[in-house]
């Protein structure tokens, strides 16, 4: 975010991190701001802070003054697999429930 500000294009909004859990601990694989991603489903499902207040604060430039976010306990997984494109090397399997891994334990 420092570089974004340095370039004169500050980011105002909500940004979330995509993580992968490895034997060496969590690692960042992406930063994202799109609400249409399947990963957003699981992040927002755990958010207890009202989203409307966060969006409003981002729109008027007061997000830094917003109280800390409140998160629900537990973990979540996407409720549906991403759609597959015809001819994909990974065709969608239909009629099966999604495989949900057990919660990560250290």
Image (cartoon, rainbow, N blue to C red):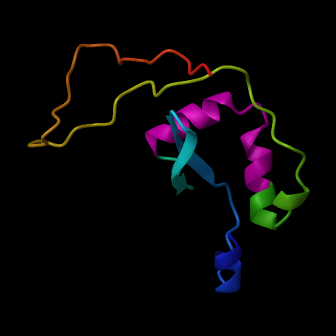
Considering depth in this image, is 31 or 104 the residue closer to the camera?
104
Question: What is the total number of numbered labels drawn onto the structure image?
Answer: 0
Q: Left or right? Give the position of 22 relative to 1.
A: left
Considering depth in this image, is 34 or 60 the residue closer to the camera?
34
Magenta includes 40?
A: yes
| Quadrant of the rendering where the N terminus is positioned | bottom right
Q: Residue at x 50, y 15 (%)?
A: 102
Magenta region: which residues? Answer: 37-56
Residue that protrudes farthest toward the left in the picture: 87
Q: Residue at x 71, y 74 (%)?
A: 2
Residue 67 image position (x, y, % from top left): 90, 46
* Quadrant of res 7: bottom right
What secondary structure predominates along the stretch shown in magenta? helix
Residue 64 image position (x, y, % from top left): 85, 60
* Quadrant of res 45: top right
Residue 78 image position (x, y, % from top left): 46, 28
Magenta includes 65?
A: no
């Amino acid at each position: 975010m420092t570089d974004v500000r340095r370039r004169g294009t500050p980011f105002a909004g909500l940004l979330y991190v995509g993580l992968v859990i490895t034997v060496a601990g969590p690692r960042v694989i992406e930063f994202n701001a799109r609400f249409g991603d399947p990963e957003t489903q699981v992040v927002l499902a755990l958010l207890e802070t009202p989203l409307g207040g966060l969006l409003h604060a981002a729109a008027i430039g007061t997000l830094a003054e917003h109280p800390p976010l409140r998160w629900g306990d537990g973990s979540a997984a996407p409720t549906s697999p991403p759609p597959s494109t015809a001819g994909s090397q990974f065709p969608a399997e239909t009629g099966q429930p999604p495989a949900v891994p057990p919660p990560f334990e250290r």
